[in-house]
Image (cartoon, rainbow, N blue to C red):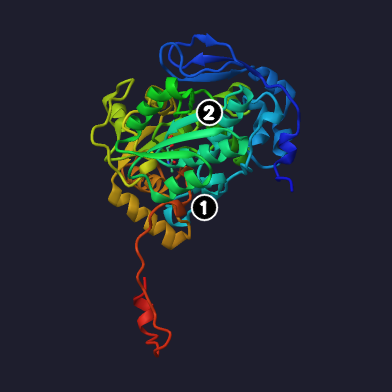
């Protein structure tokens, strides 16, 4: 059986990548070689001959291709279609949320839980593993709060590569088990994600693995960039007014902003770009603190804690890129507490039938808060990112039991049970 994306994958092709570039200093690095960070220890960004892309394909041609991530192949780094490692990265829906709407602007949830392995980490790891294959890498490693490790495990299995995954010991049980079930070697570590990251870095020499940590290689961001390309496409080559993004390492926010700028530079988007809003939990909000203090970089957040494990990232190597995108776009950074996150998850599930992950629920809580504070208006169209399936997380206990051998007191069912 063939995946529906087949058409987007079969075209043998070269890409429009010209070189890689240090995101802080702008110095250049050759494409088609294995790279981690730049000489300055900062993330590398992939650069393209955008004008050549513009000459070779039209928006209309793109929109006629199957609706998946590879529709945008000209904007992506994989040179040979045979190296693409795919599990069916279909477009994700924009779901209207009437109960959040208070004016003429629409409020839409982009539900990334529909992707392979149930989170948007699939976009980044699909790209990173495909590029690892293209560059001849065989053994991959990463620190993870859960979802990235699951996506790495799946794509590495698919590519026939080895994967080593390290997660904080309180990572949701489902995540740890799905990582193992998809063939990776996984360990719980008695620390946070930055401690896990240190282990991956320290083990490099002894284990000979390639470090796929967030932004420590150049290609996960190109995968996450497809969220921006896809959004523009779904809006008819236009954009929403404001995007609320739950921000951990920030790959998605940086990637989307990169996508919008690339599209704008070839005239596929106009002058108006969305305001990017970085959403964090108040128990771990290094980006919000740096935004408010007006600094270029963010300091490590001590004693990080939140139920939204995907955004429990005390220090992000791409901090200045997140802050730059937020500021350049006219957006802001905002923190919400765990109580508001869980209340939002409960409310949207019960009212709208959409089971959010805690990180997705954080964007709902942040949207409400920003609206109340006048930082967004009811006239603005807002996109809130639900980055993973709510099913991957612990849910509140349900104890309602019914004895089928006794007469049932039907009246009791209305207010008891759940
Ligand atoms: C990884 C993750 C995030 C944070 O995404 P970044 O792009 O790394 O900031 C948010 N939510 C969930 C569910 C995640 O898995």
Pick whichever, 156 or 110, lies toward us.
156
- Res 111 seen here: no
Name the residue carrying label 1.
96
Placement of the C terminus among the 4 image quadrants: bottom left
State the residue lying farthest toward the left: 303
Q: Is residue 212 above or below residue 185?
A: above
Dot 2 falls on a residue whose secondary structure is: strand
Residue at figure coordinates x 27%, y 30% from the top left: 289
Q: Is residue 156 above or below residue 297?
A: below
Dot 1 falls on a residue whose secondary structure is: strand
C-alpha separation, residue under disc 1 versus residue under disc 2: 42 Å
Q: Quadrant of ligand 1?
A: top left
Pick whichever, 400 or 381, lies toward us.
400
| Label 2 CB-ligand 1 distance < 8 A | no
Disc 1 residue crowd, few under 14, some 14–19, many 20+, Cα 10 Å: some
Disc 2 residue crowd, few under 14, some 14–19, many 20+, Cα 10 Å: some
Q: Position of residue 234 (x, y in %)?
A: 61, 41
State the residue lying farthest toward the top: 27
Is 304 situated left or right of 59 in this image? left
Name the residue carrying label 2.
139
Residue at figure coordinates x 61%, y 21% from the top left: 135
Q: Position of residue 203 (x, y in %)?
A: 40, 25
Q: Position of residue 155 (x, y in %)?
A: 57, 38
Q: Position of residue 301 (x, y in %)?
A: 26, 31
């Amino acid at each position: 059986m063939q995946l529906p994306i087949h058409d987007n994958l079969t075209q043998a092709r070269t890409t429009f990548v010209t070189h890689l570039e240090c995101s802080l200093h702008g110095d250049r690095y050759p494409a088609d070689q294995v790279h981690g960070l730049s000489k300055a220890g900062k993330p590398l960004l992939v650069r393209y001959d955008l004008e050549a892309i513009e000459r070779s394909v039209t928006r209309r041609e793109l929109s006629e291709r199957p609706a998946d991530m590879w529709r945008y192949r000209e904007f992506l780094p994989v040179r040979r279609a045979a190296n693409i490692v795919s599990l069916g990265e279909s477009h994700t829906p924009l779901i209207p949320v009437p109960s959040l709407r208070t004016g003429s602007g629409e409020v839409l949830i982009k539900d990334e839980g529909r992707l392979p392995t149930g989170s948007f980490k699939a976009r980044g790891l699909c790209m990173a593993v495909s590029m690892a294959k293209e560059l001849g890498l065989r053994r991959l490693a990463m620190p993870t709060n859960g979802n990235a490790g699951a996506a790495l495990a799946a794509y590495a299995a698919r590519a026939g590569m080895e994967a080593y995954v390290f997660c904080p010991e309180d990572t949701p049980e489902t995540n740890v088990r799905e990582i193992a079930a998809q063939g990776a070697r996984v360990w719980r570590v008695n620390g946070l994600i930055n401690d896990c990251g240190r282990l991956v870095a320290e083990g490099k020499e002894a284990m000979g693995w390639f470090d796929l940590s967030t932004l420590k290689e150049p290609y996960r961001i190109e995968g996450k960039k497809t969220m921006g390309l896809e959004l523009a496409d779904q809006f008819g080559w236009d954009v929403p007014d404001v995007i609320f993004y739950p921000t951990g390492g920030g790959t998605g926010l940086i990637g989307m902003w990169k996508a919008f700028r690339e599209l704008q530079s070839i005239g596929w988007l106009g002058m108006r770009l969305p305001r990017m809003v970085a959403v964090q939990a108040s128990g771990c909000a290094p980006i919000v603190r740096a935004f408010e203090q007006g600094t270029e970089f963010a300091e490590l957040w001590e004693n990080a804690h939140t139920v939204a494990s995907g955004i429990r990232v005390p220090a992000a190597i791409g901090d200045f890129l997140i802050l730059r995108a937020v500021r350049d776009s006219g957006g802001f950074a905002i923190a919400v507490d765990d109580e508001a996150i869980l209340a939002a998850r409960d409310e949207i599930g019960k009212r709208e039938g959409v089971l959010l992950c805690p990180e997705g629920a954080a964007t709902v809580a942040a949207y409400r808060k920003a609206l109340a504070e006048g930082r967004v208006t009811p006239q603005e169209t807002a996109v809130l990112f639900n980055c993973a399936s709510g099913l991957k997380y612990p849910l509140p206990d349900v104890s309602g039991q019914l004895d089928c051998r006794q007469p049932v007191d039907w009246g009791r069912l209305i207010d008891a049970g759940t």
